[in-house]
Image (cartoon, rainbow, N blue to C red):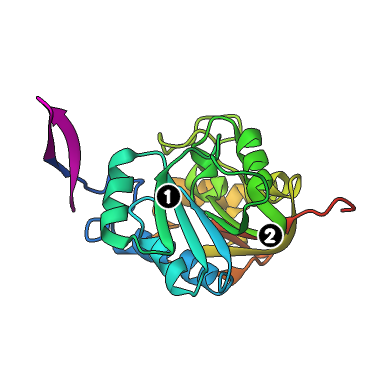
């Protein structure tokens, strides 16, 4: 994918081509592996069912494909927020409409007033930030009373096996990765949890310590993220999921 970066040269605005390819994190249409692309698409397709007539914030919107899916779901307004100027320029030119707007912004300092959105999507973002508490508080602040947050994050048990929450994840782009229980606990500290979903399941039995040690030693590819189902399914106690997705709402004062 090619986008343009504008710069000023002797009083004239010059547009330069900027090449954008998949680096392992930011999803790029036509460059991202199909498995990763499908995982992201199915999250947005699920969220699409919840946005009709709503004011929606898509945090870390990236190239804007997901924000467009939400817009096509009948949202009254969608704001896509991303920290990259170049990416926002691209998303605006490709997907921007009267009801779909893209802005540069940071989850740690969301530039909107309190109680501004009915629905917020926050997919594969929280594991990147240095201050999770501040991020959760900002999401809580701009969400309207009884508003819905749909948030996802990778499951450390599968993405950084053998590591604790205090250790650097295997993915060098991440600052923290949660287990399923840790993710539920952290989100539940700020929001009322409605549903927990997962993607790319594996039978939890093979993650028992003695079996896991044997499998990872003798069969290092015993679990492949290419396998499993990208569609969201309600989390089962007998499975671990590569990605966890939580649907929750802003707590009322008496909760």
Predominant SS of the magenta segment: strand
The stretch drawn in magenta includes residue 4: yes
Magenta segment: 1-15
Q: Is residue 61 above or below residue 13?
A: below
Q: Residues within 10 Å of mark 2 (few under 14, many from 20)?
A: many
Q: Is residue 45 above or below residue 161?
A: below
Cα gap from disc 1 to disc 2, whole angstroms: 48 Å
Q: Nearer the viewer, residue 53 or 238?
A: 53
Mark 2, secondary structure of its residue: strand
Question: Residue at 48% across / 47% down in the picture?
Answer: 159
Q: In the rendered image, which residue does mark 1 sit on?
A: 218
Question: Which residue, as the protein is rendered here, is positioned at the far top?
Answer: 10
Q: In the rendered image, which residue does mark 2 sit on?
A: 147
Q: Quadrant of residue 8?
A: top left
Q: Which mark is residue 241?
A: none
Question: Which residue, as the protein is rendered here, is positioned at the far right?
Answer: 254
Question: x, y (%) of residue 190?
Answer: 74, 46
């Amino acid at each position: 994918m090619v986008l343009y970066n504008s710069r000023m040269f002797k009083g004239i605005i010059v547009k330069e081509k900027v090449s954008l390819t998949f680096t392992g994190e930011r999803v790029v249409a036509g460059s991202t592996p199909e498995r990763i692309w499908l995982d992201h698409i199915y999250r947005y397709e699920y969220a699409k069912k919840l946005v009709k007539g709503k004011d929606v914030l898509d945090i870390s919107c990236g190239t804007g494909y997901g924000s467009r899916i939400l817009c096509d779901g009948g949202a009254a307004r969608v704001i896509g927020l991303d920290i990259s100027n170049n990416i926002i320029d691209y998303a605006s030119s490709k997907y921007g409409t009267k009801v779909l707007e893209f802005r540069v912004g940071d989850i740690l300092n969301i530039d909107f007033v309190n109680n501004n959105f009915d629905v917020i999507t926050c997919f594969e973002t929280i594991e990147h930030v240095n201050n999770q508490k501040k991020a959760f508080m900002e999401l809580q602040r701009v969400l309207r009373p009884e508003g819905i947050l749909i948030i996802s994050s990778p499951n450390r048990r599968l993405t950084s096996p053998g590591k604790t929450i205090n250790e650097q994840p295997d993915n060098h782009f991440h600052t923290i990765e949660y287990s399923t229980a840790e993710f539920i606990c952290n989100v539940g500290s700020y929001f009322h949890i409605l549903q927990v979903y997962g993607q790319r399941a594996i039978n939890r039995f093979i993650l028992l310590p003695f079996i896991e040690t044997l499998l990872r030693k003798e069969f290092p590819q015993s679990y492949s993220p290419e396998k499993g189902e990208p569609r969201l399914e309600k989390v089962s106690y007998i499975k671990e999921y590569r990605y966890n997705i939580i649907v929750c709402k802003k707590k009322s004062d008496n909760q």
